Amino acid sequence: MEEQTRLTAWVRGHVQGVGFRWWVRSRALELGLTGSAGNLADGRVEVIAEGARSDCDRLLALLRGGRTPGMVNGVVERWTEPRGDLHGFIER
């Protein structure tokens, strides 16, 4: 079985009010990931995803890939051990 991980990514740019969280949720579900995408007060979107390392890497590449709704100016990520407490993928 492939290594499981937890990705937390903070996405900055014009990413609120443009369908970005819905887009992230759709990509994450296609990859079989669990987690959430939520707006932060400072205009960033926080993405939390758990699953296979390769699938989380794919999601991170999509976040940075330039084909998202709005405009991404940067993504900062943190990798940690999965907690296993996430079910489905929700927009917050």
Image: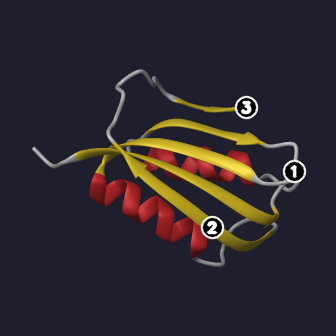
Q: Which residue is mark 1?
A: 42
Quarter of the image with the N terminus is top left
Residue 40 position (above or below residue 92)? below
Secondary element at image label 1: loop
Write down the quadrant of residue 4 in the picture.
top left
Cα distance between the residues tagged 2 and 1: 14 Å
The earlier-in-sequence mark between 2 and 3 is 2
Task: Tell me, for residue 92, which label it has, or none.
Answer: 3
Q: Which residue is mark 2?
A: 75
* Mark 2: few/some/many CA within 10 Å (<14, 14-19, 20+): some
Q: Is residue 31 visible?
A: no
The earlier-in-sequence mark between 2 and 1 is 1
Secondary element at image label 3: loop
Residue shown at 47% from the left, 43% from the top:
49
The earlier-in-sequence mark between 1 and 3 is 1
Q: Amino acid at mark 3?
A: Arg
Residue shown at 90% from the left, 51% from the top:
17
Whether residue 4 sits left or right of residue 83 in the image: it is: left
Residue 36 position within the rendered picture, expressed as x and y whole percent measured from the top left: 59, 36
Q: Are marks 2 and 1 in contact (CB under 8 Å)?
A: no
Cα distance between the residues tagged 2 and 3: 18 Å
Write down the quadrant of residue 89 in the picture.
top right
Q: Are marks 1 and 3 in contact (CB under 8 Å)?
A: no
Q: Residue furthest left?
A: 1
Q: Are marks 2 and 3 in contact (CB under 8 Å)?
A: no
Residue 20 position within the rendered picture, expressed as x and y whole percent measured from the top left: 74, 54
Residue 40 position (above or below residue 62)? above
